[in-house]
Amino acid sequence: MDKELFDKGLAKRKATLGADYVEQNLAAADDFTRPFQEAMTAWCWGFGWGDETLSPKTRSMLNLAMLGALGRMHEWETHCRGALNNGVTKDEIRAIIHAVGIYGGVPLALECFRSARKILDERAAS
């Protein structure tokens, strides 16, 4: 594993998802899952998110659209929290969900709205 790419990815991952969340995931990794956690941190976060061509906000918006269209709701919720951390607004999240509904299907948009409501309510309560 490329240590420099891992370190870069770890910083990007923590900045978006929160240090506590990331540290809990890494601490929970065992011999079976640790190699994937490390590779994903280096590749997705170091290589992907480490490319400064797109801002973190833009990348978060793209992720919400793609994850929503794929129906990956657990990851969508995680990245919805991260998108808020990266400055994506409630109105922008709504617009992203509209695009998911138009291009991916209404049932997916409904799931995104349910998940977004959960995350926005959590944010408002904290």
Image (cartoon, grey):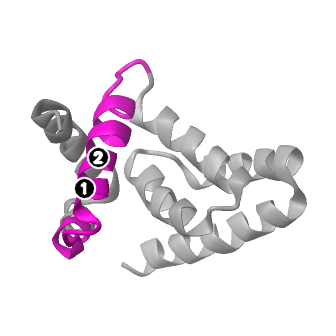
Residue displayed at 18% across by 38% down = 1
Residue displayed at 31% across by 55% down = 36
Amino acid type, callout 2? Ala
- The residue labelled by disc 2 is 39
Quarter of the figure with the C terminus: bottom left
Amino acid type, callout 1? Pro
Q: Which residues are magenta?
A: 24-53
Q: Nearer the viewer, residue 31 or 70?
A: 31
Quarter residue 23 falls in: bottom left
Q: Residue furthest front?
A: 32
Q: Relative to residue 61, is residue 112 depicted above or below?
A: below
Residue 54 lies, in percent from the top left, at 45, 24
Residue 39 lies, in percent from the top left, at 29, 46
Label pair 1/2, CB-CB below 8 angstroms: yes
Q: Is residue 63 left or right of residue 56?
A: right
- The residue labelled by disc 1 is 35
Q: For the residue labelled by badge 1, is the local secondary structure a helix, a strand or a loop?
A: helix
Residue displayed at 27% across by 67% down = 21
Q: Residues within 10 Å of mark 2 (few under 14, many from 20)?
A: some
Q: Is residue 107 magenta?
A: no
Main SS of the magenta part reads helix
